[in-house]
Structures are given as structure tokens and as C-alpha cells.
Image: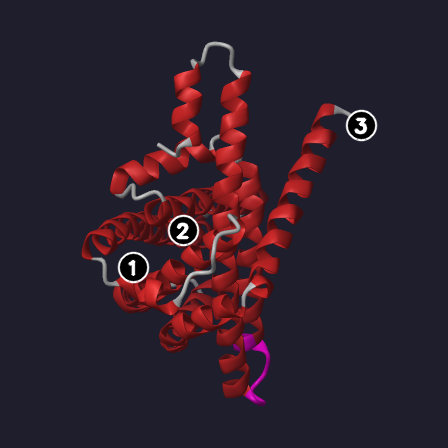
């Protein structure tokens, strides 16, 4: 087994190890299941409306793909994108942040073998103004960056597609479009892992805003592929469920959508549990990496172990 094969094997082992640990967390405490379920109720209803808007945007997008037209693009698709972004900015953002807060705290307690968190402790943390303000600042940074990246990428790729189809479509331009789309998706998933870790850092370490983003970048350095693979799992989960709900026929469509949204909620809860495990693993890998560097002082290693 050569170096690349060994590295790939190690990445897959780490991936399955993180997923296995995350999936075992709910079974360690029924309190965790109850808290995550209660926190997911607002997210469920927010996602129902989000999926409706998303479906409308996908319908317009499919029309653009079938018959590229600048007027349809400007009047329909861009409007749906802006509406989707605004909805994600407040209702969906806040409801998912509530789920993240409960899940991260519960999963962290389980992973570090501490006493399971209680409802009273969760409520006390949620009403802590200073803590909530810091977490909200970090999540707002992440939300604006991630949403902006998605909007700009989607807008550029769609415009490029319209221009290519209308003026100079050939095998080279088609291959270039596919390559750029895949590259943007890979980079987005890599960055999503770092963005999620920054929110975990903000909740567990008390570091907020740009400092949390900077620390997450530092911790995830060298682990980008692991983060990409983890986020790819949940990306495929979400896309697969949405595809089933949107294109599975008209029979039982409402119930299928409700069930799909419920499974998407479950996926988001599990995603944050995975992010907690990934955060702790990144800290361990960072310490190992620093220890292997001869020019680093013991003080630097101690600082990283402390999460500072």
C-alpha cells in the first residue's frame, strides 16, 4: 500500500469513526433525545416553508435549463434566490441555531463523559445574554459568508450556462462548466466544515466572531478532506430526501414532504453531533501536528490543547 492509498484508508477510518461515535451519542442518554426533539420542533415548521420556497426556485431553475432565457433568469430565478436567502437569514437561521445550541451542548457532555445536561441548564444557557450575543455574532458571520457564496456561485454558474448555450456551446465549454461546478461544491463543503466548527468553538470555548472563525481554520488545517467527506454525507442525505419529495410523483406528496422534512431535521441534529466530534478530533490532530514540528515551543502546544 503506497502513501496515497494509506492516506485514503486513514481518512475513511477517521470518517467512519466520527460517524459511529456521533450516532451512538443519542443512545447514551434519553435526555439528549428529548432535548433535541423539542429543539427541532421550530426547525421543522421553518423547514416546511423553506422547502416550499426552494421547490419554487428549483422549478424556475429547471425552466431556465430547458429554455435558457435572460428574462426568465432576471425576473424569476433571481427573485426566488433572494427570497430564499432572506428566509434563511432570520426564521431558518434562528431555528437551526437553537437546534445547534442544544445539540452541541448535549453532544459535548456525552463525548467528554460528563453529566448529561438538563433542561434547566439548557434554558439558563439559552437566556445568557453575553453568550447568546457571541454565538449569534459568529453564526451571523457564517451565515452571511455561506449564503453569499451560494448565491454568487449559483448566479455565476447559471449565467455562464445561459451564455454558453446561447452563443458557443461545445464539448470544451460543457466540460469546463461541470469542472467549475464540482470544484465550487467541493470548496463549499470544505468551508462548511470549518464554518460549523467555528460555531461549535463559539458555543464550547467562548470565542466569538472573527476569532472563532480564525481558530476553526487553524484547527481544521490539514483535515480539510475529512471535513469535506463528513459534510458530503449530510449533503447527499439532504439532496436525496429533497429529490424524493420533489420528484417522486403526486401520490401522497404532502405526507412525503412532511416525512422528508422530518428526516432532514434529524440529519441536521446528527450533523451538529458529528461537528462536535470533529471539533474534538481536530484539536487532537492539531496537537499531534504541532508536536511533530520541531520548531514549535511547548508553550504553543499547551495553548492549542487549551483551545486558545
Q: Residues within 10 Å of mark 3 (few under 14, many from 20)?
A: few
Q: For the residues carrying marks 2 and 1, which lies nearer the camera in this image?
A: 1
The numbered mark at residue 1 is 3
Dot 1: element: helix
Q: Quadrant of the C terminus?
A: top left
In this figure, which residue is indicated by the disc labeled 1?
A: 125
The magenta-colored residue range is 245-252
First along the sequence among labels 2 and 1: 1
Which of 150 and 229 lies nearest the eye of the viewer? Answer: 229
Q: Is residue 150 above or below residue 118?
A: above
Dot 3: element: loop
Position of residue 136 measured from the top left corner of the image (x, y, whole percent): 25, 54
Q: Is residue 68 left or right of residue 97?
A: right
The numbered mark at residue 163 is 2
The Cα atoms of the two marked residues, 2 and 1, are separated by 51 Å
Q: Quadrant of the N terminus?
A: top right
Please tell me how many numbered marks the rendered image carries: 3
Q: Residues within 10 Å of mark 1 (few under 14, many from 20)?
A: some
Q: Is residue 282 left or right of residue 45?
A: right
Residue situated furthest right in the rendering: 1
The Cα atoms of the two marked residues, 3 and 1, are separated by 49 Å
Which of 1 and 129 lies nearest the eye of the viewer? Answer: 129
Q: For the residues carrying marks 3 and 1, which lies nearer the camera in this image?
A: 1
Amino acid at each position: 500500500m503506497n502513501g496515497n492509498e494509506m492516506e485514503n484508508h486513514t481518512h475513511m477510518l477517521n470518517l467512519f469513526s466520527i460517524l459511529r461515535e456521533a450516532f451512538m451519542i443519542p443512545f447514551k442518554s434519553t435526555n439528549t433525545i428529548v432535548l433535541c426533539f423539542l429543539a427541532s420542533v421550530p426547525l421543522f415548521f421553518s423547514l416546511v416553508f423553506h422547502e416550499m420556497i426552494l421547490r419554487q426556485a428549483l422549478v424556475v431553475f429547471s425552466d431556465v435549463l430547458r429554455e435558457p432565457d435572460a428574462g426568465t433568469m432576471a425576473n424569476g430565478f433571481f427573485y426566488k434566490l433572494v427570497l430564499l436567502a432572506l428566509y434563511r437569514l432570520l426564521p431558518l437561521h434562528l431555528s437551526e441555531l437553537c437546534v445547534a445550541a442544544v445539540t452541541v451542548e448535549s453532544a459535548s457532555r456525552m463525548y467528554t463523559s460528563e453529566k448529561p445536561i438538563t433542561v434547566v441548564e439548557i434554558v439558563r444557557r439559552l437566556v445568557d445574554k453575553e453568550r447568546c450575543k457571541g454565538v449569534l455574532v459568529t453564526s451571523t458571520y457564517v451565515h452571511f459568508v455561506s449564503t453569499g457564496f451560494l448565491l454568487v456561485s449559483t448566479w455565476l454558474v447559471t449565467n455562464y450556462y445561459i451564455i454558453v448555450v446561447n452563443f458557443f456551446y461545445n464539448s470544451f465549454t460543457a466540460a469546463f462548466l461541470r469542472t467549475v461546478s464540482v470544484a465550487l461544491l467541493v470548496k463549499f463543503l470544505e468551508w462548511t466544515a470549518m464554518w460549523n466548527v467555528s460555531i461549535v468553538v463559539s458555543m464550547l470555548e467562548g470565542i466569538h466572531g472573527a476569532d472563532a472563525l480564525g481558530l476553526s481554520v487553524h484547527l481544521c488545517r490539514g483535515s480539510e478532506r475529512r471535513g469535506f467527506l463528513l459534510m458530503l454525507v449530510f449533503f447527499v442525505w439532504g439532496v436525496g430526501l429533497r429529490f424524493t419529495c420533489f420528484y417522486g410523483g403526486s401520490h401522497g406528496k404532502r405526507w412525503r414532504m412532511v416525512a422528508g422534512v422530518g428526516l432532514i431535521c434529524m440529519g441536521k441534529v446528527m450533523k451538529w453531533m458529528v461537528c462536535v466530534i470533529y471539533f474534538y478530533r481536530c484539536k487532537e490532530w492539531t496537537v499531534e501536528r504541532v508536536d511533530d514540528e520541531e520548531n514549535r515551543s511547548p508553550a504553543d502546544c499547551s495553548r492549542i490543547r487549551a483551545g486558545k
